Image (spheres, rainbow, N blue to C red):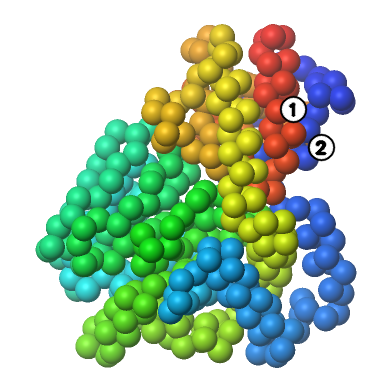
Amino acid sequence: MTEFPDIQLPDDLLPADGRFGSGPSKVRLEALARLAATGTELLGTSHRRPAVIGLVERLRRGLSDLFSAPPGYEVMVGLGGATAFWDAATFSLIARKSQHVVIGEFSSKFAAAVSGSPHLEEPDVIRVDYGHSAQPVADDDVDAYALIHNETSTGVMNQIVRPASSGLVLVDATSAAGGLPVDPSQFDVYYFSPQKAFGSEGGLWAALCSPAAIERIETVTNGERWIPPFLDLGIALTNSRKNQTYNTPALATLALFVDQVEWMNERGGLDWAVDRCATSASTVYRWAETSDFASPFVSDPAARSATVATVDLDETIPAGVVSGVLRANGIVDTESYRKLGRNQLRVALFPAIDPDDVTRLTQCIDHVVERL
Ligand SMILES: *Cc1c(COP(=O)(O)O)cnc(C)c1O
């Protein structure tokens, strides 16, 4: 274990909740309490019974409301998180050839999952240096565009704009959905795991699908291509329409997910959540820009994420030590994405995180750095 300097943060400076991880991220204590209060009614009961079917129904309705889903769009739910969804999309959504916009580790993983699959052509990959955003290039030879709304490894957000082409637009929105604005007419599939902006646990994926995406799934999964059933989105669609999942879901994940979606919808929906994240983001970036030891990693202000902020520290201040001291004071998971390899702090700004706590976090960082 690395030894960190013994710096005690004063109680009146500490955030009310010290969880700033980018995933798993802060789960609201009220949601946990409500889950515990279900007692014998939910956990440990059959997922084919009304208690659970009702949860999936509330989840699908709540997400449709949150994203103002246009007519014909449907919410699908399945198991395995966004990572499993990449494999499901490889089997059930891409017809022949995809184009991937790779701006960080997560977007590169989907491209890698597609590359080499025996039933598809090698994908086109558009790559930019990490820390920058990028857009797809319309290409009539491509039937699916793999975009990322927010690159969690770098803190870069992309605008989601449909290229002028008939290809499906598949958006990894895992750390964006519920925290960044989006226009559903610009995508065909908007998929995500619930342990980021939805303040739940990992293990599930949800996907808002356009009629074109549903049609593609029905065509691709019609039996001509061998598809492992777990990755067959035709099966996921059939189950989702019955408010079920193909196999046993994590009920606690589901319950916390529903709690968060309804919490957002009761407070003003996506606009409210987006505003809350934007408030936190302006606090962090303004602090970093005026600090004499910190600066935003992402140079283009328009690409600085409002859900995951990355802040570089001066070389003389080891970010790992700052994160370590914060951790010893109960402020956790501010470490940067390991593979990015920068002297950096990464701070989640998801809706569950109180903007006042973000202000306190910046004050705590100042306090630590002054004493190093
Ligand atoms: C966290 C994350 C993933 C992976 O999610 P899992 O639930 O672990 O599969 C994929 N994409 C993005 C953008 C993420 O932030």
Give how far across and how far down residue 236 sits, in percent. Answer: 46, 81
Callouts 2 and 1 close, C-beta under 8 Å = yes
Q: Is residue 190 above or below residue 364?
A: below
Mark on residue 61? none
- Where disc 1 sits, the SS reads helix
Which residue does the image show at 27% across and 81% down from the upper left?
Answer: 220
Q: Which residue in the protein does label 1 denote?
A: 360
Label 1: few (<14), some or many (≥20) within 10 Å? some
Residue 64: % across, % down? 55, 70
Q: Splitting the image into 4 quarters, where does residue 227 fall?
A: bottom left
Quadrant in the picture for the C terminus: top right
Q: Quick one: quadrant of the N terminus?
A: top right
- Amino acid at pointer 1: Arg
Q: Is residue 135 above or below residue 296?
A: below
Mark sitting on residue 16: 2
Residue 179 lies, in percent from the top left, at 56, 50
Residue 158, image x, y percentages: 39, 44
> Mark 2 belongs to which amino acid?
Ala
